Amino acid sequence: MIQKIKNPLFDSNENPETDLSKLKSPTSYSEKNRRKKEYKKLFNKESAIEATKEFEKNVDVFGFTKGQFSLIDLIEATLDKTGPAHLTVSTWTAKTADLQDVLKFLDKGRILSARFLIDYSFQRRQPGAAQAIRQKFGKGSVKVSMNHAKFFMLGNDDGWKVTCKTSMNLNTNPRFEDFDLSNCYELFNFMQTMTAEIFSKGVKDGNETGSDVWSDWG
């Protein structure tokens, strides 16, 4: 049995852990319409920009890497395509340096908001990173649970509803990894329904930059 660890970054009157076993949203998705998809083997020094070169609103990209670029690099390259967008990240772990890049995206106007679903052990392994997220994006932008899912979502009003399913965590990791980028509205809306339920649970603190804004267009 896994021992639950009290999260010191949350107030004592909060429930820091979200029980995902009680989700009411659908938890499986079947693709009904085949879309054009590019397949890539990126085993040398190809960058995230090269990896997303063919990615368009109607072209999905699936690929493997040897760790020559990180999930942060992939997010940045995707933002080059979409323009400013709302960001959702689900990760098991991250490093403070990589999260600082996300904060830079916000400061430069590249992301409109950000929210993070992290494993409950994250704040024990990376307390500084967890605190930085909470201070910058607000309490409602961080959800803690028994989480091992890795994905990110980017969405805006310019026709982009991007979902990236991946094996990568939000940190530099020179290992064999995969990623699947899609601008499929049906898949995005499926993911958005579930994440909206997750992020709707929590305490409002007047700084919910990564929560309520999604419901305005998503």
Image (cartoon, rainbow, N blue to C red):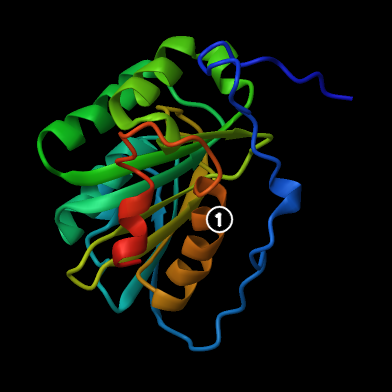
The quarter of the displayed image where residue 201 is located: top right
Q: x%, y% of residue 22?
A: 74, 51
Which residue type carries mark 1? Glu
Look at mark 1 in the image and give the residue it sits on: 197
| Residue 49 in sight | no
What residue sits 10% from the left and 36% below the top? 108
Q: Label 1: few (<14), some or many (≥20) within 10 Å? A: few
Q: Where in the figure is residue 168, as x and y percent of width and height?
A: 49, 40
Q: How many marks?
A: 1
**Residue 211 rendering spot, x and y as whole percentages:** 38, 47
Quadrant showing the C terminus: bottom left
| Quadrant holding the N terminus | top right
Q: Secondary structure at mark 1?
A: helix
Q: Is residue 50 left or right of residue 94?
A: left
Judge by depth and name the residue closer to the eye, 161 or 201: 201
Q: Position of residue 91 (x, y in %)?
A: 52, 37
| Residue drawn at the location 52% of the way across and 64% of the way down | 193
Up/down of 46 relative to 63, above or below: above
Tell which residue pokes out farthest to the bottom in this image: 33
User: From this viewpoint, is residue 114 visible?
Assistant: yes
Q: Is residue 58 left or right of residue 66?
A: left
Residue at 44%, 67% (x, y): give it: 188
Q: Nearer the viewer, residue 61 or 207?
A: 207
Q: Residue at x 31, y 45 (%)?
A: 74
Please identify the quarter of the rendering in which residue 215 is found.
bottom left
Residue ranking furthest to the right: 1
Q: Is residue 153 left or right of residue 151?
A: left
Viewer-side residue, 12 vs 157: 12
